[in-house]
Amino acid sequence: MGICRHKIADAWAKRDKQRREAEAAMTEAQARPGGPVTAGVDAAATDRVLLLDELDHLGQPQRGIIELAFFEDLTHAQIAERTGLPLGTIKSHIRRTLERLRTRLEVDGAALHA
C-alpha cells in the first residue's frame, strides 16, 4: 500500500513540476523585449507540453515506436528492421497508440489544435 501511495505522490509531483515549468517558459517568452508571444505560438507550446506529458504515460515498446515514427521520421519497415519486431506488430502498435493518445486528449478536453 505504501509503494502505491508513493507512486501516486511521485506522479502528482511530476505533473506539478511540468506545469510549473510550462508556466515559467510562457512567462519568460512573454517577457522578451520583442513583446508578447502571439496566441498561435502560445497554443503550439501548450500543445507540445501536453503531448510530451501524454507520451510519458506510454510504456515500451509503444513510446519508442512512436518516437521512431514521428520524431525520427522512419518508415514502418525501417522501424521493424531497427527494433526486430514484425512489420504488422509495428503497424498495430502505431495505430493503437495513436488511438489511445487521441482518446486521452479528447477525454481530457485538451485535444490539440488543428
Image (spheres, rainbow, N blue to C red):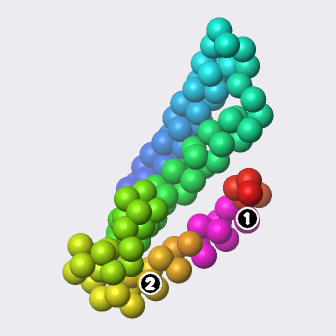
Residue 25 at least partly seen:
yes
Which residue: 71% across, 41% down? Answer: 43
The reply, left or right, for residue 49 in relation to residue 111 is left
Q: Between residues 96 and 37, which one lies in front from this camera angle?
A: 37
Residue receiving disc 1 = 106
Indicate the amino acid at tag 1: Glu
Quadrant hosting residue 81: bottom left
| Secondary element at tag 1 | helix
Residue to which mark 2 is pinned: 91
Above or below, 8 against 33 in this view is: below
Tell me the amino acid under the disc marked 2: Lys
**Visible residue check, residue 63:** no
Q: Quadrant of the N terminus?
A: bottom left
Residue at position x 59%, y 67% in the image: 101
Q: Earlier in the sequence, mark 1 or mark 2?
A: 2
Camera-side residue of 13 and 19? 19
What residue lies at 73% left-to-right and 65% top-to-bottom?
Answer: 107
Q: Name the spot of residue 103 as percent of width and height, x first.
A: 67, 71
Secondary-structure class at tag 2: helix
Q: Which residue occupies the foreground of this view, 8 or 24?
A: 24
**Residue 113 placed where, x, y %?**
74, 53
Residue 100, image x, y percentages: 58, 73
Q: Which residues are magenta?
A: 99-108
